[in-house]
Amino acid sequence: MSKDRIPRPVAIDVVNSHVPPGAPDAVLFEVAWEVCWQLGGIYTVLKTKADNMLSRWGDRYFLVGPYNPATAATEFEECPAPELIDNVFSRLREQGVVCHFGRWLVPGRPHVILLDYRARYPRLHEDKYLLHADHGISTPPDDGEVNDVIAFGFTVTEFFRLLKETAPQVPVVAHFHEWMGGVAVPRIAHLRIDVSTVFTTHATLLGRYLAGDNPQFYDHLPFFNADAEADKYRILPRHLIEKAAAHASTVFTTVSQITSYEAEKLLGRVPDHVLPNGIDVRRFEAPHELQHLHRLYKERIHQFVIGHFFPSYSFDLERTLYFFISGRYEYRNKGIDIYIEALHRLNHRLRHEENPPTIVAFIITKAPVRSINVDVIENQARLDELARFIETIKDEIGHKIFMAAASQRQLQRGELIDESVQISLRRITAAMRRFRQPHIVTHDLTDDAHDPTLNHLRGRHMVNFAGDPVKVVFHPQFVTSTSPLLGLDYDQFIRGCHLGVFPSYYEPWGYTPLEAIVSGVPAVTSDLSGFGAYVRGTMTPDEHEGLWVLNRRTQSFDQSADELADAMHRFVHYNRRQRIDLRNKVESLSERFDWGRLSTHYHDAHDLALSRRGQRAGSISVKIV
């Protein structure tokens, strides 16, 4: 990869100055599809950032999203709206729009406005005409998602129009996230509503498609005809909505230097600010319980591993390490391909060592599945049966030991376990025995034959041979405490692991390595992820022990796979004390990524938007090239 294609990350000042907003009576609204509705990473950004926004804006901070009855029932608590918002609601209700005001049930309990955009459907043809006539964006009649986004965008536009009619003197900043929340941005600019807009693209829609198909994505990025490529992938209306929002916004932002470069090339505007994503460190804090929680959840992973592997063969769990990769199922973009390749090379090295440790490498994602594999669930059921049987006899055995010791007599051979117990144990263990290799995937995939992860594993003969030190478990569903396999929430699962590996090729930011390190789990990221680039730009090498940044920017795939295999190999040979020390060191880094520090970048973007109040926005229509 050419070294001069992507600008090097620059150091970002993380001193939280808490400068007052540009106007002391200004009101901030954040608008996103994911408000009270978990769909992706933006939900995490909004939820974890809210408390820090409140510390600056107080009751002048509101989140705005679409009303979804299913998620609002558990995420949202309705309450009376303040006078200003209630006046706007009254006028919206006259148009048939059902409005809800309340609090989001997350830390800080921020004020939330949920608008039932479905009331806009009768005017959808008119709205789509205006989107075409005023902004050059044509949309198909039968794309349900685009129709929803347009209806929501025009409903939000009407909300801000009525707000400014009701209180024209109040300075308003409206911060919009992603293309699904972005339709209102060019509409506000076109109608000249006195609202300063901020638009954040967390990842360009087109970039995900191009990176997934193009191994030289970053080299080719300056030369793509973005509109033509979007048309080829059949996402042109979505791309043009994102492009129009970027150009029409008062302040255009993104989440990393890498995505800033991508946005410039694919959307045609250089972002004004970079807003790195933080995390609520308090949610993960357990400095005095770090090792205890690791042992506790590792034992639960042990139980799964025993049930999955031990019916076929066994290995020493005291010398077993757990690696994992997780996230959206994008085989190339998320680095699953290089993870598997590095595991293959690690396996080859360890096979030539005397008495190597065992590595169980998890792949945790969400792929289309039919059901849990019957053999996998049966193995866990047999193990549960054995555990229940042991539970029933342990009191009896304990009583026998107690009575013998109290009577000062020696226990006789066979006295502890009588013949009936031995027969039952033989029956249960015989039923557990399997004369085949353990499965590499826990579920039956909808399209097993064409799955890229399975094909890569099979092509590299990573199919859980007994003699292989590196075993693989592909779990194509996100882990939850209700799962009959692992029975752990994701936060618990990662605490029980030893190493998180996230060598992304395309990752605008990347929460997964961040979640690992705040849990005290060493992690690998890459310099092609926004988070990895941020680490490279703000930390010196001796400050991030336990956090490796893989070079994918200037190396070939093979070179990066070798570097990753080297890092894994070194980690495998750390002793227990070294791994504990590494967990403590990496957990101590977490404070650097807390929203208490990083929210200052949002404050700067909002201040800039207020300072530009009344200035003409950029282009509010898009020209297809």
Image (tube, rainbow, N blue to C red):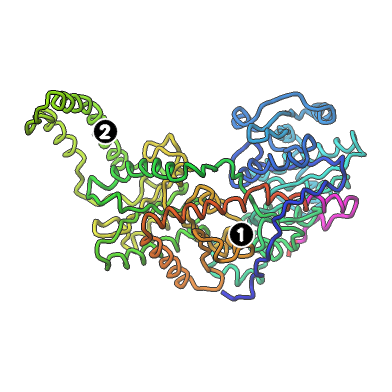
* Secondary structure of the residue carrying numbered label 2: helix
Seen as rendered, the residue at the extreme left is 413
For label 1, the SS is helix
The residue pinned by badge 1 equals: 530
Eye-nearest disc, 1 or 2: 2
Q: Is 555 above or below relative to 518?
A: below
Q: Which residue is mark 2?
A: 387
Residue 142 shows in this picture = no
The residue at the far front in this view is 408
Q: Quadrant of the N terminus?
A: bottom right
Residue appearing at x 38%, y 56% in the figure? 454
- Give left or right: position of 289 versus 606: left
Q: Position of residue 604 (x, y in %)?
A: 78, 53
Query: Which residue range is magenta in the image?
Result: 605-623
Q: Position of residue 85 (x, y in %)?
A: 81, 31
Q: Position of residue 497 (x, y in %)?
A: 42, 49
User: Amino acid type of disc 2?
Assistant: Ala
> From the image, which quarter does the C terminus lie in?
bottom right
